[in-house]
Amino acid sequence: MIKRIIARLDIKNSFLVKGMHLEGLRILGYPELFSRKYFEEGIDEIIFQDVVASLYKRNQLSSLTNKISNNTFVPIIVGGGIRNIQDIKETLINGADRVSINTGAIENKNFIREAVKIFGSSTICISIETLKIENKYKIFTDSGRTEINKNTFDWIKEVQDLGVGEIILTSINKEGTGKGYDIKLYEEASKITNVSLLAHGGAKNPSDVYEVFSKTDIDGAVIASAFHFNYYKELLDKKDIPLKGSTDFLKKNNNHQILFGINNLKEYLKKKKITIR
């Protein structure tokens, strides 16, 4: 099976942002520059996640997606604040290939059934944010802020039955930490998943990606911090970024501990006999 390498870009007010455990977001730059760079470096897919969609009650990424999709020719997944059929239509019209839905699925499973019927299972992804608490995996929404009384593995089974084509599973415990993927989480999830499963949260170096590919049956690795911090100094020079939202962090952190490039990762995985694009 061919494994996919996917970049995730969290967007807030037209800026690329990054935090830890889905919190403490800092401005890193302009998503259009990072997206173009990732495309040039051979990324397989890109996820755009509107991290303030719950605040505004809708996804704010249509114009940005439209602009980026015109010169970045890889599949694009857009998530955040997608609650109805019209939201999906608008997102796809503006250049997305697939949509990622979290809260909307939990609030209304009939919405997901209808979406699959209209757009096809390959277009509908379910995003699951899970936090390990006292050895149990619990579901959260709103970028990790709201706990839902659902077991993660039970929810995976439920959404599969709705006919979706893909599940993006984020470990809140590991996200942004660079402490490696939660192998136990993805081992258990991949045992019960019969659709495409993507792992997000924890990659610090290429060996972490190799470990999750070799020890679990996931289809793709979603990576954010490692790619962003590998390329941001190069991209900072191309456009001035307003000094707000802890932007000073960029100029002071010249030796971030979590970083590697897309080409480096793919070369490493090929040497390890992982089948990639």
Image (spheres, rainbow, N blue to C red):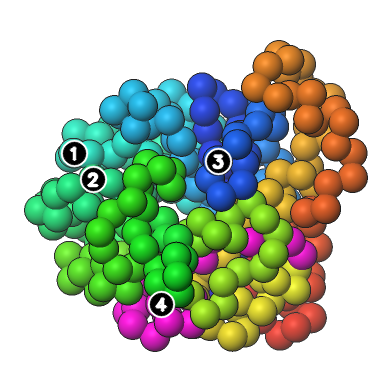
| Distance from the alpha carbon under mark 4 to that under mark 2 | 21 Å
Q: Earlier in the sequence, mark 3 or mark 1?
A: 3
Residue 113 in which image quadrant: bottom left
Q: Nearer the viewer, mark 2 or mark 1?
A: 2
Amino acid residing under circle 3: Glu
Left of 161 or right of it: where is 203? right
Q: Position of residue 171 (x, y in %)?
A: 50, 61
Amino acid residing under circle 1: Asn
Q: Nearer the viewer, mark 3 or mark 4?
A: 3
Give the residues in magenta: 186-205
* Residue density around tag 3, few if under 14, some if 14–19, many if 20 or more, within 10 Å: some
Q: Residue under circle 1? A: 84
Amino acid residing under circle 2: Gly
| Distance from the alpha carbon under mark 2 to that under mark 1 | 8 Å
Is 89 located above or below residue 177 in the figure? above
Q: Residue under circle 4? A: 189
